Image (cartoon, rainbow, N blue to C red):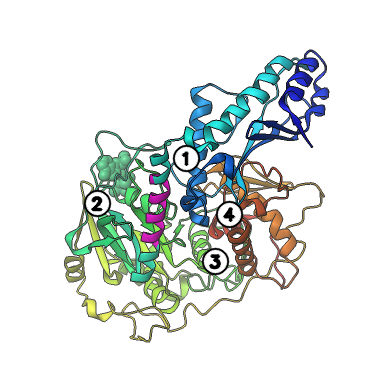
Amino acid sequence: MNSPRSNLASTLHNLDGRSYGNYKQIRGSYEFGPVTVFIDRVQVDPFASPSKVRIRINRAEAGFPTDITTERADRIAASDFLFRVGDSFLHRNDRRSIILGRPGQEVLERTNVVIDDDGFEARLLVNLPARGRRILGHQAADILTRDVPELAQAMFVHSNLRADGLHEHVQLHRDQLELQNHLGEEGLLAFIGNDSILPRRSGDSDLPMDSHAVAFTSPTSLEHTVTLSSGRSLTGMAIPHGVTVIVGGGYHGKSTILRALERGVYPHIAGDGREWVITEPSATSIRAEDGRAVTGDDISPFINNLPSGTDTGSFTTTNTSGSTSQAANLVEAVEVGARSLLIDEDTSATNFMIRDERMRALIPADREPITPFVDRIRPLFSERGVSTVLVAGGSSAFFEVADHVIALDAYVPQEVTEKAHELVGVNPADFASTSPAGSGDDKSDSAGGSSDTFATPRPRIPTAKALRPSSKTKSAKAKGLGQVQFGKAFIDLSAVSQLVDVQQTAGIAEALEYMAEIFDNRTSLTEALAEIDDMLDAQGVDGLTGNRDHPGHVARPRAQEIAAALNRFRGLQLVE
Ligand code: ADP
Ligand code: MG
């Protein structure tokens, strides 16, 4: 039931000095002009997780134009804009008790601010003030009856906002999605717009490098221009599907390009420098990650005849090596539907990637369990339609399997495919037209490999109990960006580089709980992930959480990153 504001204020003033537990009386909803404040959950003591508060305004009162707040994608962008408005309002006014969440450089779908058919809502966490264990009632009254409604006015009353800023934010997001769709239609894997700023300020900052950054320029041979329906015209480097190898001297910017591509699966805000770095949405970074657990992966395209006699068609271990972990990461990405892989030599296991001629001569093939990636990269494309962008500055081995070789010289890319092919004596016609399976072109592969190296692997079906830790209570929780606690186990996600926001990690924790309900000894891992994606498309991120009134602060993870967590869970068990 709604009560007038004076009620909440006077209740809080009266509570001043009383013991903290009395705060629980303020649960309920309160009207402040057009703003409704919902106090959904009250913390039991000053050190408990903060109280859950929502603010809401009806559409009519908010006065937003409907043309940018109706379509699902527009709502995500507009919510993101309002989220940023709220964040800077709280900082400017030093409102430290009120937590709205922290925006980063990407536009992500989140629970923090949502737009629905009826209105606008923000989900806040509020630390109710105390001295010792006594209620600070007058301060609490300021926070809940003045600061919180003011925040709602700042975010949700259209006339209080920079309307052109909102419009540009939504339009940029539309253009980015249109460009991403365009890539799909044109058979392109990624696009890097000219003038993009790819390097970041420092290893621990995602902000653009300021003064010394060399802006991106496309090699002419790969230059592509697209005009979007907004009228915006973009020119930059288009990376086609197939095999692309990035070479260049150390420190010339190779890894920086690859990192920009891996982030390009998410749209970036204006001013980031990567607004026009757009990668097809399923692209997945693959690296070595020794020590991780693997459950039932078919890594046999890469690893066979291990000295231990272990079955690599259904490979299970609690402790992978560099090469087996990279093979596992790769087949798992393909299993969830990755259409392209991003691989950096810096984070790869050399023996997984290549084997040189002398080593091939010294160690007979039947004593070497690993078929290096260089021998599988073309069949992976021709049989499964999976492309690769690879940074390889230290070896020429990939020249002969590359459709395109791009050389970086002081951060400036040039296409050097012809020269690279000449050097290794390859006629590009040998494979350049090798196309993904099903495209009607079954030309054989210069790189060797039988026609069914990558036979569709047997689906992996987790047991019904696999994700149900013994305790009944909520069992999964994000512990920072790179870790999920799941029951008593910890899942290490620190090597999962396309996880960009701790709220996505929270989303993964929710997804694990959600999947625990799906698995029934029949549903495969990929089917469960598809079910989650469908649900997220239909219901938004709120649908992932157990608590729909106030779901806390959660962002949408990709299926790839949810799978990454499941695959790294040491308690995962499969139906035989
Ligand atoms: P590589 O992988 O070729 O060794 P990196 O991508 O790691 O090189 O880049 C080396 C350094 O150069 C990094 O500190 C990076 O921030 C910086 N850098 C990369 N690209 C640019 C650029 N376009 N302009 C300025 N500095 C850059
Ligand atoms: Mg590097």
**Ligand 2 is within 8 Å of the C-beta of the residue at disc 3:** no
Residue at the location (73% across, 22% down)? 6
Residue type at the position of mark 2: Asn
Query: In the image, ligand 1 is in what quadrant?
Result: top left
Image check: 73 left or right of 229?
A: right
**Of the residues under marks 1 and 4, which one precedes in the sequence?**
1
Percent x, y of residue 309:
60, 71
Amino acid of disc 4: Arg
**How far is mark 3 from mark 2, CA to CA?**
32 Å
Residue beneath disc 1: 104
**Is residue 550 magenta-colored?**
no
Tell me the tag on residue 356: none
Q: Nearer the viewer, mark 1 or mark 4?
A: 1
Q: CA distance from mark 1 to mark 2?
A: 23 Å
Given this view, does label 3 or label 4 mark the residue nearer the observer?
3
Q: Secondary structure at mark 3?
A: loop
Give the residue type that dot 1 points to: Gly
Q: Could you say whether the residue bearing mark 1 is in a helix, strand or loop?
A: loop
Looking at the rendering, the stretch of residues picked out in magenta corresponds to 168-180
Q: Marks 4/2: CA distance?
A: 39 Å
Q: Earlier in the sequence, mark 3 or mark 4?
A: 4
